[in-house]
């Protein structure tokens, strides 16, 4: 699951985006249950967003939805590699043995006060290699009371449709960091 955060300077809030076929609510429920078993109690679940900004995930379905989860507690950001590897395992588990393709896409990452970091298995100029073929990407940053995208930010993130959910998770992060700070001081 990755190590728990023990310092407010390294504490992050684990999130995960999930792409799944709109016509498979049972697959979403399965994924939700498996994510909870794998990463711990779910704190927030976003609404379902239509995902139609790329055809990259046609191997899953031509009619996709994206939802996000955040998980209770704070984690250490070094868990990102382990989280991505666990997500890859869950994607493989989502497919029946007779199928050659995944049925869901699971993208773990984290939110803290300044940024959203997502894990990837794909190298690119804007991604930093961590280890075990996993990369980290600063997908968006927080500036002047809002989320700011970059030239490489995925179009759905850059559109702002996820901002309300990400703001709520950031508030949860701030609350948990305050609690951690108080417990470290007391």
Image (cartoon, rainbow, N blue to C red):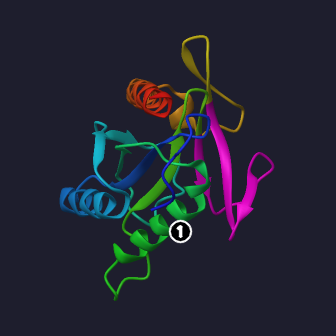
Number of numbered discs = 1
Q: Residue at x 43, y 32 (%)?
A: 183
Name the quadrant of the C terminus: top left
- Which residue has dot 1 on it? 85
Classify residue 134 by image quadrant: bottom right
As drawn, which residue projects farthest toward the bottom? Answer: 98
Residue in the foreground of this view, choosing between 139 and 35? 35
The quadrant of the picture occupied by the N terminus is: bottom left
**Magenta stretch: helix, strand or loop mostly:** strand
Residue ranking furthest to the top = 144
Q: Which residue does the image show at 23% across and 64% down from the upper left?
A: 30
Whether residue 102 is visible to the viewer of this picture, yes or no, is no
One can see residue 65 in this view: yes
Place of residue 47 in the rendered image (x, y in percent of width and height, measured from the top left): 28, 36
What residue occupies the far left of the structure in this picture?
A: 26
Asked if residue 156 is positioned above or below residue 109 in the image, the reply reads above
Residue 172: in magenta span:
no
Seen at 74% across and 50% down, the residue is: 127
Going by the image, does 26 lie left or right of 169?
left
Give the left or right position of residue 9, taking residue 54 as reference. right
Q: Residue furthest front?
A: 186
Q: Give the class, few, some or many, for how many residues have Cα within 10 Å of label 1's Cα (few <14, many ≥20).
A: some
* Helix, strand or loop status at disc 1: helix
Residue 29: x and y in percent read: 21, 58
Report the magenta residues as a range: 117-140
Give percent across and percent down for residue 10: 60, 40
Q: Position of residue 117 (x, y in %)?
A: 60, 42
Residue shown at the point (56%, 39%) measured from the top left: 7
The reply to whether the magenta stretch includes residue 120 is yes
Answer above or below: position of 25 versus 145.
below
Viewer-nearest residue: 152 or 38: 38
């Amino acid at each position: 699951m990755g190590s728990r955060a023990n310092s407010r300077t390294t504490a992050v809030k684990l999130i995960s985006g999930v792409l799944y076929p709109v016509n498979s609510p049972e697959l979403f429920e399965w994924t939700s249950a498996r994510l909870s078993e794998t990463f711990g109690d779910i704190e927030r679940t976003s609404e379902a967003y239509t995902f139609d900004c790329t055809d990259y995930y046609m191997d899953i379905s031509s009619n996709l939805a994206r939802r996000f989860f955040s998980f209770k507690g704070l984690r250490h950001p070094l868990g990102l590699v382990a989280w991505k590897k666990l997500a890859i395992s869950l994607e493989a588990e989502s497919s029946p043995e007779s199928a050659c393709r995944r049925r869901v896409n699971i993208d773990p990452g984290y939110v803290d006060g300044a940024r959203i970091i997502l894990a990837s298995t794909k190298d690119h100029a804007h991604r930093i290699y961590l280890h075990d073929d996993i990369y980290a990407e600063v997908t968006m940053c927080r500036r002047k009371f809002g989320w700011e995208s970059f030239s490489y930010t995925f179009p759905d993130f850059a559109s702002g449709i996820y901002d309300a959910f990400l703001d709520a998770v950031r508030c949860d992060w701030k609350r948990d960091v305050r609690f951690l700070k108080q417990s470290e001081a007391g």
